[in-house]
Amino acid sequence: MRLVVDLNKCQGYAQCAFLAPDVFAMHGDEALIYNPHAPEEQRERLARAVAACPVQAITADGLDDRGDKRDTGNAGATGDVQEASDGR
Amino acid sequence: MVADYVDWLRREGRIVIVGASLAGLRAAETLRAEGFAGELTLIGDEPYEPYDRPPLSKSVLLGKASPHRTELPHRREIDAKWRLGVPATGLDLSAKRVRLADGDEVEYDRLLIATGVRARPWPKEEEARLDGVCLLRTRDDAADLYQRLKAGPRRVFVIGAGFAGSEVASACRETGIPVTVAERAGAPLVGALGGVIGAVAADLQTENGVDLRTGVTVTSLEGDSVGRVRAVHLSDESVVEADVVVVSLGSVRNTDWLAGSGLGAGPRGIACDAGCRAFDFRGIVTDDVFVAGDVARSPHALFGYQFLSLEHWGNAVAQAETAAHNMICHGADRRPHLWMPAFWSSMFGVNIKSVGVPSMGDQLMITQGSLAERRFVGVYGHQGRVIAAVTFDNTRWLEFYARQIERGAPFPVEYPTVDRRPEGRQPVAADFPDPSLPTHGPTVTLSGYSPADQQLVFHPARH
């Protein structure tokens, strides 16, 4: 899965680094280092990191078709219709 | 009539985007998101779909990401025709055609130019061809440099201590590779952040084991008998042996292909109005050619209507969205591109972020934290108002200062701030180098009228 972090938005809350430590890591106190290509087995963790980011700085594709429905029961019913067809 | 044209364009027009990187991709997505149903073509000189560049000098060099896997996630399906690996070589404004390197021509009804910049090469071509002399801009560059770092070079030599060069030096030190950095100015990052902050960056480098040489230029690169680089000669007559040389001298705007097209394009980029419409060489705005990203320069109300070229990731996204919106809507619905300049970098474990245009600042105040601790907010002032801010490991305050810049808040900063130290009570000179001197360049180019602009001198005729 591809992802990108808008590091202008990122404020170093490090939620992603706790939730998906194989994808995101803090580099010093505040800087974030991440792998823009997360392996498939990281899908669930990545979805949690995307959802947990307090400033919503993470964009990932290929998550919506499965991750959202499983993780957030109420959002899955409304939010994923359009985005699911865009999953890559 | 005009309204009909836009409706027709939205339904079945042809839009061509030259430049298939961040700005081109985000523009394409915005066009589709806003209802463009016509034919969309993306032309890119690299044979790859749009990928992200910032990781190339950070996680890729640290071995935490593959240079070949930084493709950008798509926000939505864009249903585009991709012409990748084929550079555009010319533009015919009257026939509305883009010429491609393979001889093909692509017709458009509206065109978006997002060709960005390329790394400025080492000027001596023969030396630049030596094995081991590298640039860092594309994913191929990053893959090559990563391989060379992994092979355990005896020493890496970085020419130019801007952000990219400093990030390379940081990655070298973190992976235990000896590295020398040469910078023409008195410290790293001075073009972007001035000498006061540059001194902090210099300390960061030396404390992390970088052999930093400032106030020097590289005079030549020496190769061995089989064409590999082996040493770097400096203007102070010292010689440094190195088997990898990273040329990090800033960038060149990709406007060469527009030579003779009649568009207002040159080494400083393509001039456009605040609505992203390109100017022709007469300074008249075009109707069907738009510009976005690093290659554009556009006037900004917050910064004295100077034409700003911003080589910033966030600018590429915001300007692409605005350009795409304006391409397919009626005049009254168009938006100006008035994005607050912002960028980030990280080196030696320190997060450096900025808003506004620091290089416009004459004075600097450390309003929070301290330089010695490498955790601070620096506020730049110009003509009595706040014009920019920079943070080292203090990003959460940055948004506050962005609002100050938008409001034209007074400078010096008189109100109390959290963690103000005695050193931050008075402004000091920000200490930017003379803009008329050549340098590897800040990532912001000011090219409009400004009292500080010393690049043009008026000589009255003598009779």
Image (cartoon, coloured by chain):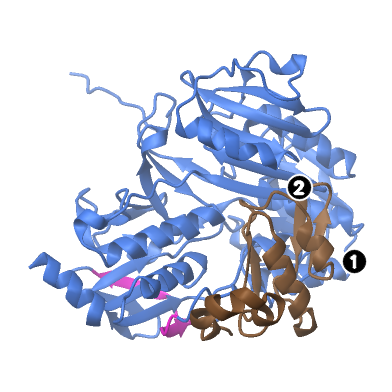
Write down the quadrant of residue B144 in the picture.
bottom right
Q: Main secondary structure of the magenta part?
A: strand
Q: Is residue B135 visible?
A: no
Do discs 1 and 2 share a chain?
A: yes
- Horizontal and vertical percent position of residue A28: 84, 49
Does residue B85 belong to the magenta stretch?
A: yes
Closer-to-camera residue (B327/B446): B327
The chain letter for the residue carrying disc 1 is B
Which quarter of the image is occupied by the N terminus of chain B?
bottom left
Q: Is residue B276 visible?
A: yes
- Of the two numbered discs 1 and 2 on the same chain, state the one appearing first in sequence: 1
**Residue at mark 1:** B152
**Residue at mark 2:** B233
Write down the quadrant of residue A69 in the picture.
bottom right
Chain painted in blue in the figure? B
Instruction: Classify mark 1: helix, strand or loop.
Output: loop
Closer-to-camera residue (B16/B407): B407
The answer to whether B89 is drawn above or below residue B114 in the figure is below
Amino acid of disc 1: Gly
- Horizontal and vertical percent position of residue B46: 53, 76
Amino acid of disc 2: His
Does residue B25 belong to the magenta stretch?
A: no
Nearer to us of marks 1 and 2 is 1
Closer-to-camera residue (A33/B10): B10
Residue lying at 42% horizontally and 29% vertically, measured from the top left:
B453
- Horizontal and vertical percent position of residue B151: 87, 71
Q: Colour of chain A?
A: brown
The answer to whether B419 is drawn above or below residue B73 in the figure is above
The chain letter for the residue carrying disc 2 is B
The answer to whether B167 is drawn above or below residue B144 in the figure is above
**Magenta segment, which residues?**
B78-92
